[in-house]
Image (cartoon, rainbow, N blue to C red):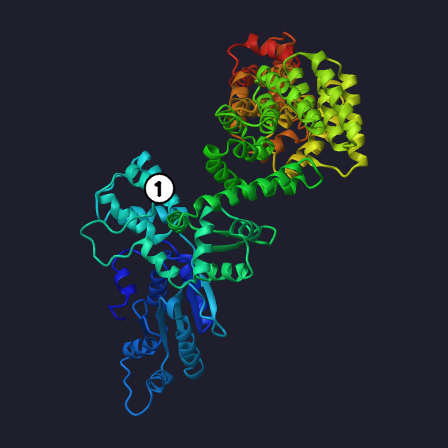
Amino acid sequence: MDQAWPGARHSLTRFIGRGTETAALLQQLRDTRLVTLVGAPGTGKTRLAAEASHSAGSFRDGVRPVALATVSEPGDVLTELAASLDVRAAEETLVDALLEALRSQESLVLLDNCEHVVGPVAALVERILTSCPGVRVLATSRVPLGVPGERLHRVPALDRTDAYDLFVDRAALVTDLVLDEDGTAWVRRICDRLDGLPLAIELAARQARVLSLPDLAERLDTELARAAAPGNSPDAPTMAATIEWSCHLLTPAQNGLFETLSVFAGSFDVQAVEAVSGGGEDLVADLGVVVDHSLLLAEPSTSGALRYRMLEPIRQYAAARLAGRGAAEESRERHAQHYLRAARTASAGLMGVDGHLRHGELRGMEANVLAAVAWARPVCPDLALHLLVCLAEYWEQRGHIREARTRLEDLLHQGSVSPRARADTLLSLAQLCYRQERYEQACRYGQDLIPIMEELGDRPGLANGLRALSQAHAAAGQVDRARAAAEASVEIFDELGDRLGEARARTALGFAHYAGGQVEQGLEANLVSWQILQSEPEAPTVARGTHMGLCFAYANLDDVEGHRRHLTAAIAALRQIGALDGDPEWLWAGVALAHSEGRWASSVKLAALTRTRARAGSGMVPFVREFCQPATEEAERRLGPRVAEALAEEGARMTVEEAVGEALGHPNPDASPLTPREREVARLTGRGMSNTEIAEELVISRRTVESHQDHIRHKLGLASRYEVMVWAMTGSV
């Protein structure tokens, strides 16, 4: 292989990862005569082509590498290829001489860096493939060649493990790199910041010679990886140079679109591109060209629609160009306004029949909404608050309570905001504080927002505010105020004809009754809510609250079947909207159900997990906790302190799916840590019988009884025979 080809230089360093990808590429070369490696600048197309060609091994006449990066004229493509094959033309044309030389060969022609001369390369490759049956072509390009029969192999960035290994390997070539736990974390942060792009990682690794890992990471937060450190080859490429190479191939309009796309964070759809770029007749075509040049990734979503994403080093470069021509502020304002409209539409639908779909939409736009907030915060606090409010309920469903509250409070207190923005923010804060067990603060926020909603003439907002205020009063033990606020909320929703809003308000009314110990009245309110949901298309977000209210009622009324039925339905509703991990209430219902069914181990494990979640900022109201506490204590007593402690440690580490299994598990009479014989011995001990009397009763030896007693004390964590007697007398066996 020609040592002048860049791939040969790459072979001087270790090839990291891509084993599966190399194997797949080799198979494609066996199946197809033309394979083109396409990918973003710096993804390692040339290196992968070099490794694959080294491993090919089945070509009688070997591999013919042709480096086209320095070719500037279309006619030079043929000249370069002919030179690599040592072909000269006398009387015939050079192309005929080249085809004649290749016609009898079995070789792999490797064309590297074709994107700037795609037209002549494509024409030449097509002639080679039709005239030379033993020749196969492997090309690297940021855009497809467009030749019939071409097989595209898209080269992705490295995964996290391979990116880390590459950085460590290359850094070790220029410095003594000793990684402790902190150093490992810094390397992972650097690789994540560079989105796994091999070229960017190699350039950053070289800088480990002159910069500490924290300093290097800090610099990467604000700028692209720089060129090689002093002492390296003067022609070493930089990320900026590799990206600029692609930009030279774009039209001015395409370059403008490329730069505008840098305002996006994470992934985005074509509608967002239209809104932020201002549209245009050629927008879709120009977007396709930017994708074809591998400056933008196009990835199918779970719904099948394409979503777009820029690798971070490329985005930073585009953002610098956008700022350089003074267009960043205008683009960012359009970006913020678009995501405000999109997030408002999605968040308004969270309570509807398609709430789970709107939840998914908000998850997909979360990164862009937060990017818009960061831009709007210093220039338009109202806009920033409205954006955050759109995410508040979504964050609540995901369990990000503390983060949501902190963001809203910080921005609300930053400066002067409009009554509209203040009211909407206070409504969200009342709900979030309630979830964090900050009940007095939730009441204050609720009381502050009511007069603002009235002044604005916002009846739906007023009804929602009264509902939020009701649940805060109920949790704070102010039962009369809670009932009055809930009844007022029900009345307004009824006037508005908002059936789902009424159902949710009636759930709050039931909650207020439960807080006052009025279980029958609470059950009635929740049953009315449930009836509304039967006559209207069921909305999982609303249904979840109704099911939880019915769980509490049936648990208090010892209706185990009803409790299980509605807990199952509540879990299904939460799963549908993707909020199972963020909502703690079903866990407490699971504790109570497990206790009612004698599943002591499940009760203890679930209670431990609820306590863990509460410490993370998603707690439970006092009267529900007080209802569940005796159940947990009884389960711990029946199991014994040692077993209960071990189960609690296990429960605190459970995944959501494991917790669902514990909550909805069926009663198992053999769940006791004691064997059947040990339970018999414990039961007779509880009657006050001596070991000799127990031996006679069970027709076993006294020594066997003593052995059983030892096992019982060890398993239950009890210190004496007397404690075994007390444990058995409580009805634990």
Q: Quadrant of residue 651?
A: top right
Residue shown at 52%/16% (left/top)? 717
* 153 to 175, vertically: above or below: below
- SS for tag 1? loop
* 112 to 236, vertically: above or below: below
Q: In the depicted view, which residue is nearer to us: 94 or 101?
A: 94
The quadrant of the picture occupied by the C terminus is top right
Kind of residue sitting beneath label 1: Thr
Residue 232 drawn at (x, y percent): 20, 53
Residue 601 drawn at (x, y percent): 60, 24
Q: Is residue 100 visible?
A: yes
Residue pointed to by mark 1: 222
User: In the rendered view, does 88 fall on the left or right side of 596?
Assistant: left
Residue 122 drawn at (x, y percent): 43, 74
Residue shown at 51%/48% (left/top)? 267
The quadrant of the picture occupied by the N terminus is bottom left
Residue 417 drawn at (x, y percent): 54, 27
Residue shown at 74%/16% (left/top)? 484
Q: In the depicted view, which residue is nearer to us: 696 or 306?
A: 306
